[in-house]
Image (tube, coloured by chain):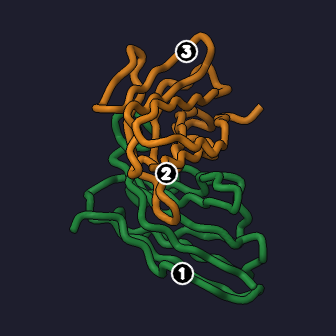
Chain colours: A orange, B green
C-alpha cells in the first residue's frame, strides 16, 4: 500500500460546481496533514493545513478522519482558477526525523 | 523579494556529464530540502539539511551530493548523469524539519533533461 494515495483524476467540473477529493494514508501515527496546490509546470504551494476538528478557508473545507485514515478537500463554487493538481501531504516519523510524504496529486479541471 | 530561488530553471545535458543546481533562500529558515518530481508527478524527498547539517538522506544514489555552505544555501551536484535522472528538482525550505506549523516553501524547480 502506498504511503499516501490519491485518485489521480482528472475531475472535470463546470464552474460553480462542488467537488471533493479524498486521500488515504498508511501510517496511523501520522500527526500532520496538508493540502498543497500545484499549477502546471509550477512549484507546489500550501493551500491549507488539515486539523482534527476540520477547517474551512473560504470555499475550501478540509476534513480528517483518523479512524479510517483519510483526509478530504471540498471545494465549493468552483472557479476556472481552481484548475490545478491538488497534493495530499502527510507527515511521517521515520529514522529519527519527521518528513513530509506527498501523494501523486488529483488533477482538477474547471470548465466554463 | 523573499523567496526560495534555484538555478538554472532548465538544464539539458548528455549522459555521463556532471552538473550542479544551486538553491538559496532568504526567508531565514533553518531547514532546506531537495525534492525530485518524476514523470508520474510523485514528489519525493531526497535530502534535508538543518543549519548546514545533513538530517535526511533518503535512498538516493551516491552520484547525488548535496552541499550546504551556510543555512541559506543548499546546492545539489550530480555526477555521471543517467537518463533516469531526468525530472524536475525542487528546492524547498521550512522553519523547522518536517511538519507541524511549518509549511514548505518551494523554489520554482529545475527541469533536468538527460539525453
Please report, as a chain letter, where disc 3 is located: A
Cα gap from disc 3 to disc 1, whole angstroms: 41 Å
Q: Secondary structure at mark 2?
A: strand
Q: Which residue is mark 3?
A: A66
Q: Residue at x 42, y 64 (%)?
A: B107
Q: Quadrant of residue B89?
A: bottom right
**CB under 8 Å between discs 1 and 2:** no
Choose the circle earlier in sequence order: 3 or 2: 3
Residue B16 visible in the shown view:
yes
Q: How many marks?
A: 3
Q: Is residue B58 positioned above or below B82 on the image?
A: above
In the rendered image, residue B109, in percent from the top left (x then y), is placed at 49, 68
Do callouts 3 and 2 point to residues on the same chain?
yes
Q: Residue at x 49, y 42 (%)?
A: A14
* Front residue of this view, candidates A34 and A100: A34
Q: Which residue is mark 1?
A: B10
Q: Secondary structure at mark 3?
A: loop
Q: Chain of mark 2?
A: A
When the figure is inspected, residue A109 is found, relative to residue A71, above or below; the finding is: below
Circle 3/circle 2 CB separation < 8 Å: no
Q: Is residue B111 above or below residue B61?
A: below
Q: Secondary structure at mark 1?
A: strand
Q: In the rendered structure, find residue A86 and report the number of the disc placed on it.
A: none
Mark 3 Cα-neighbour bin, 10 Å: few <14, some 14–19, many ≥20: some
Q: Position of residue B22 (x, y in %)?
A: 46, 76
State left or right for residue A70 relative to residue A52: right
Q: Closer to the observer: label 1 or label 2?
A: 2
Q: Give the residue pinned by disc 2.
A: A84
Amino acid at each position: 500500500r502506498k504511503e499516501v494515495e490519491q485518485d489521480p483524476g482528472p475531475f472535470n467540473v463546470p464552474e460553480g460546481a462542488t467537488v471533493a477529493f479524498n486521500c488515504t494514508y498508511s501510517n496511523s501515527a501520522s500527526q500532520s496533514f496538508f493540502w498543497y496546490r500545484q499549477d502546471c509546470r509550477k512549484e507546489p504551494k500550501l493551500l491549507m493545513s488539515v486539523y482534527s476538528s476540520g477547517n474551512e478557508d473560504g470555499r475550501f473545507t478540509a476534513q480528517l478522519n483518523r479512524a479510517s485514515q483519510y483526509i478530504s478537500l471540498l471545494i465549493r463554487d468552483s472557479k476556472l482558477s481552481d484548475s490545478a493538481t491538488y497534493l495530499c501531504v502527510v507527515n511521517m516519523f521515520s529514522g529519527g526525523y519527521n518528513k513530509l510524504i506527498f501523494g501523486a496529486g488529483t488533477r482538477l479541471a474547471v470548465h466554463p | 523579494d523573499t523567496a526560495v530561488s534555484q538555478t538554472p530553471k532548465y538544464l539539458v545535458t548528455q549522459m555521463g556529464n556532471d552538473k550542479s543546481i544551486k538553491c538559496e533562500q532568504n526567508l531565514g529558515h533553518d531547514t532546506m530540502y531537495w525534492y525530485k518530481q518524476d514523470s508520474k508527478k510523485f514528489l519525493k524527498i531526497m535530502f534535508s539539511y538543518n543549519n548546514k547539517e545533513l538530517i535526511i538522506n533518503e535512498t538516493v544514489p551516491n552520484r547525488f551530493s548535496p552541499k550546504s555552505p551556510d543555512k541559506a544555501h543548499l546546492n545539489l551536484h550530480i555526477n555521471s548523469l543517467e537518463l533516469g535522472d531526468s525530472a524536475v528538482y525542487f528546492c524547498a525550505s521550512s522553519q523547522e524539519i518536517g511538519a507541524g506549523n511549518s509549511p514548505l516553501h518551494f523554489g520554482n524547480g529545475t527541469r533536468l533533461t538527460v539525453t
